[in-house]
Image (cartoon, rainbow, N blue to C red):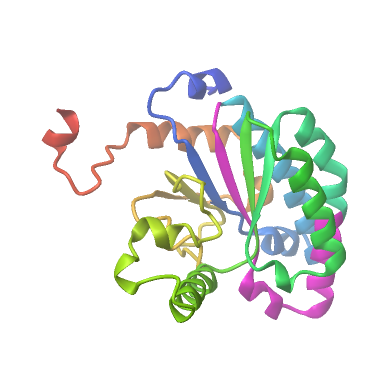
């Protein structure tokens, strides 16, 4: 049975924040005897489809894992081509995102990015900062261990300067130093391509997230698969350490 955006939108248990590990572009191209970059180009089309589908279904936050900290270890030609694709895609799509009232944020170590790429991203962030329909978070040069270490260093510097007492550090203060501060933790994390790994992605934030591992390679992942996963999520009972009876009550 076909699932429509309104079905998701009207669900009381739909996730507020969905995070996606977009995996399988290279394998999609290899299966077809194509260069790996053809898979990344095709993957961009899926990104656009899923962003649109999320906005239409009333999802308030969507995080996509665009490029990990570890991805810099890939062949230099592929890394440069991905950065170029990112730059062109952002320049092309940012106006449409703005028209659709979508706010853009970026998490990750921006110091790793080529200056031209960050300049384009920063322009998009500033243009869309007051939009309210949905927030699209792009994880770029992102690694959760790196994010946590940067947060720890920030707190350590405050302690060293005498501005912070170690006993004052709690979860709320620690989270304020993460890239995702002011963004709710993900309710649902989806990984495509049939792999069962979390790949250093939102480790702190995903403590109570629900996971779904989709068999489709990212370029083959479309609206109906996405909506089906969300509807399945809506049937799950999230207990956060409580018993079923407590949740029901």
Magenta stretch bounds: 58-87
At 39% from the left and 37% from the top, the residue drawn is 233
| Position of residue 114 in the picture relative to residue 237 (left or right) | right
At 63% from the left and 72% from the top, the residue drawn is 69
| Position of residue 52 in the picture relative to residue 96 (left or right) | left
Give how far across and how far down residue 147 sits, in percent: 53, 68
| Position of residue 120 in the picture relative to residue 8 (left or right) | right
At 76% from the left and 36% from the top, the residue drawn is 97
| Position of residue 73 in the picture relative to residue 155 (left or right) | right
Residue 101 lies, with reference to residue 91, above or below; the image says above
Tell me, yes or no, whether the highlighted magenta stretch contains residue 48: no
Q: Quadrant of the rendered structure where residue 130 is?
A: top right
Judge by depth and name the residue closer to the eye, 227 or 199: 199
Q: Is residue 170 visible?
A: yes
Judge by depth and name the residue closer to the eye, 145 or 217: 145
Q: Quadrant of the rendered structure where residue 143 is?
A: bottom right
Judge by depth and name the residue closer to the eye, 155 or 69: 155
Give how far across and how far down residue 159 sits, in percent: 43, 76
Tell me, yes or no, whether the highlighted magenta stretch contains residue 67: yes
Residue 246 lies, with reference to residue 126, above or below; the image says above
């Amino acid at each position: 049975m076909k699932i429509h955006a309104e079905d998701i939108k009207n669900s009381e248990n739909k996730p507020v924040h969905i995070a996606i590990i977009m995996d399988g572009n290279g394998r999609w191209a290899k299966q077809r005897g194509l260069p790996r970059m053809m898979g990344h180009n095709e993957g961009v089309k899926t990104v656009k489809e899923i962003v649109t589908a999320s906005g239409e279904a009333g999802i308030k936050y969507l995080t996509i894992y665009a490029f990990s900290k570890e991805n810099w270890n890939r062949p230099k030609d592929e890394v440069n081509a991905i950065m170029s694709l990112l730059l062109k895609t952002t320049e092309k799509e940012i106006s449409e995102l703005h028209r659709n009232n979508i706010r853009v944020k970026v998490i990750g170590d921006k110091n790793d990015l080529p200056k031209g790429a960050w300049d384009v991203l920063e322009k998009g962030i500033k243009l869309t900062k007051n939009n309210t329909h949905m927030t699209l978070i792009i994880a770029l040069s992102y690694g959760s261990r790196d994010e946590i270490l940067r947060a720890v260093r920030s707190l350590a510097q405050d302690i060293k300067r005498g501005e912070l007492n170690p006993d004052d550090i709690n979860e709320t203060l620690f989270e304020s130093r993460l890239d995702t501060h002011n963004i709710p933790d993900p309710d649902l994390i989806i990984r495509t391509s049939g792999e069962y790994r979390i790949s250093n992605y939102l480790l702190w934030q995903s403590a109570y997230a629900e996971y779904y591992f989709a068999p489709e390679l990212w370029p083959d992942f479309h609206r109906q698969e996405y909506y089906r996963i969300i509807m399945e999520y809506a049937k799950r009972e999230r207990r956060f350490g409580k018993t079923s009876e407590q949740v029901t009550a």
